[in-house]
Image (cartoon, rainbow, N blue to C red):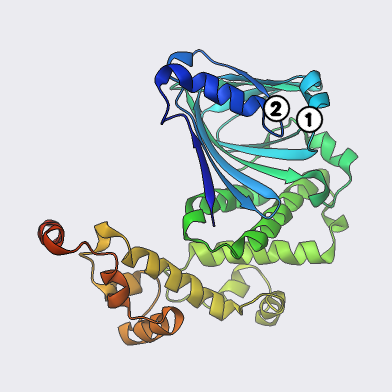
Amino acid sequence: METTVLSTRHLPKAERFDWWREMVAHSSTPTAVASEHRADFLATSEQTWLGDLRLSAVSFPSMRVSRSRTLVRRSDPERYHLVLPSRGGRWFSWERGDALVREDDLLLYDSSHAYEAHSVTRDSRLSCLMIDIPRGRLPLPTAKIDLLLGRPLPARVGTGFLLAQFLTHLARQVGTLEDGDALRLGTATSDLITALLAHHLGLFDEVGADSRERFLLTRVYAFIEEHLGDRGLSPARIAAAHHISVRTLHNVFRREEMSVTEWIKHRRLERCRRDLAEPHLFHRPIHTIAGRWGFAHPQSFSRAFNAAYECTPSDYRATFRPTGRALGVQGDALSAQANSS
C-alpha cells in the first residue's frame, strides 16, 4: 500500500516550523500550532489510506495544538480521531473537561468540537499513531459515542490492547502489504474501534452480527500474524485460542478470498519474500529463512514460493543482490559477519 510522507527534514531549519504550521492550518481539519522548538522543528507524518480511513504515524517536537470554534465552523469533515501515543503523552482540554493521555492509552476526539492539546514528554518529542475515521463508519449512536470523547481508554488490556497491537503492527507492515488489502484492513480497523467503544458503552449486544463476526475475524488475523513462525499453527489451534469450533472458524472465512489455511501460507510466503530481499540477510541460508516463518521442509517451501511468485527463492534473492565489484565487497563483509557470529 502507498504511504505519503510529509516531513520538514528536507527544509532549512529556519523554515521548518512555518511550513508545518501552514500545512495543518490548511488541512481538512485545520488547527493552529505553537512550539518552543521553532528554531529546528523536525516533524514527520506518514499517512496511509485504508479505504476512507487514514492511518498516520506522526513524530514531532513538543507543541501546543488548538482547534477553535472558528476553525470548526470554517471546516468540519465530521471525522473521529483516535490517537495512540507511543512516546510521550498529551494533555487534552475541551468543553467537557481535561484529560492526561499517557503512553499506551487511546483517546477519541472529533472534528466537530473545539479542543486544545499540548505535549507532555520526557525528551521534548512525541510519537503517536492516529486513525481518522468518518463518523458514519461507526454503527453506534453518535450521542453515545460523544460520551467517550476526550476520555482516556486503556490500551493495555482487553479490546483496547488488541486494537493498539493491531494498529502498531499495521503501521510497521504497510510497506509489505498490497493495495488490495487496504479496504479489508480499513473494515477490520473500524470493526475493532466499534468493538472498543461498544465495550466501554455496554452496547456490544447492539452491534450487528456481521460486525461481531468481522471483529472475530480481525482477532484471528492478528493471532495468525503473531504466530506465523510457529510450525504448530493450525486451524485447530487458532479455534481453541478463540474458544470456537474449527467449523465456526472456517465459516468466518467463508466470505474471504482465502481459507484460513491458505491465508497462513500466503502470509508466511510474504514474510519469506520480504526477508529474501533484505541486504542484511543475504548471508542467511534460504532454508533458515523458510524455517523461521514456519516452513518445515525446504523442498515444499521452494515449490510453494515458485507457485506463488513464478520464480525460485534463490532467483528472487538474486535480483536484490548488488553486482560486480560491489557484490564481492559486500559478500566478503557478510561472510565475515556470518563467521564471527
Q: Answer few, some or many: residues within 10 Å of disc 2's Cα (few below 14, many 20 plus, some between 14 and 19).
A: many
Give the x, y percent position of residue 180.
60, 65
Q: Is residue 154 left or right of residue 39?
A: right
Please say if 101 is above or below 188.
above
Q: Which residue is mark 1?
A: 75
Residue sitting nearer the eye, 145 or 2: 2
Q: Is residue 328 left or right of residue 57?
A: left
Visible residue check, residue 288: yes
Which amino acid type is marked by label 1? Answer: Ser
Please say if 264 is above or below 27.
below
Earlier residue among tags 2 and 1:
2
Residue sitting nearer the eye, 130 or 209: 130
Secondary structure, mark 2, is loop
Q: Quadrant of residue 281?
A: bottom left
* Rendered residue at 40%/74% (across/down): 294
Q: Which residue is mark 2?
A: 30
* Rendered residue at 44%/14% (across/down): 39
Give the x, y percent position of residue 286.
27, 73
**CA separation, marks 2 and 1?**
7 Å
Labelled pair 2, 1 in contact (Cβ < 8 Å)? yes
Visible residue check, residue 235: no
Residue sitting nearer the eye, 228 or 7: 7
Q: Quadrant of residue 328?
A: bottom left
Secondary structure, mark 1, is loop
Q: Quadrant of residue 100?
A: top right
